[in-house]
Image (cartoon, rainbow, N blue to C red):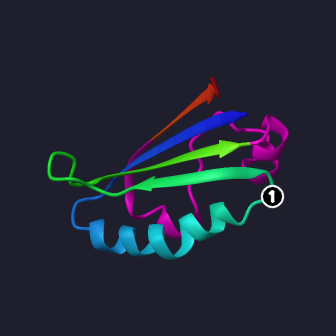
Amino acid sequence: MIIRVFRVVVQDGKREQFETFFRETAIPLTRSQPGIVSVTAGVPRAETPDEFCMVMVWESLAAMKDFVGEDWRSPHIHPDEADLVRERSIHHYELA
């Protein structure tokens, strides 16, 4: 199994707009994918007011690639969030 940790920092003043997108589009879209085992999403805390994260567990690299494509090492974003995101990162791990 593959753990995919996705993190974004939103543009100044875009937190509320991004959170709506995150809750209503990104999380449901990811949870609906074949091969997804779990999705855990994190929203900002006081010490990280503009950061969101999503931790996904995929049953296999092939299943993850079916969703994100061959360029799976890149932190992909949905076109609807492109203007909302200032910074993004992605990390992958094997499930221990």
Q: Is-magenta flag for residue 79?
A: yes
**Relative depth, front residue between 76 and 43:** 43
Mark 1 element type: loop
**Relative depth, front residue between 65 and 36:** 36
- Where does residue 69 sit, x and y in percent of width and height? 77, 46
Decide: is 8 above or below 34: above
Asked where in the image residue 20 lies, by quadrant, the reply is bottom left
**Residue beneath disc 1:** 34
Residue appearing at x 79%, y 35% in the figure = 61
In the rendered image, the residue lying farthest to the left is: 46
Magenta residues, as a range? Answer: 59-88
Residue appearing at x 55%, y 65% in the figure = 27
Decide: is 12 above or below 74: below
Residue appearing at x 80%, y 58% in the figure = 34
**Relative depth, front residue between 47 and 18:** 47
- Where does residue 77 sit, x and y in percent of width and height? 56, 55
In screen coordinates, is 34 left or right of 40? right
Give the position of the N terminus as an image quadrant: top right
Decide: is 51 above or below 89: below
- Where does residue 40 sit, x and y in percent of width and height? 50, 53
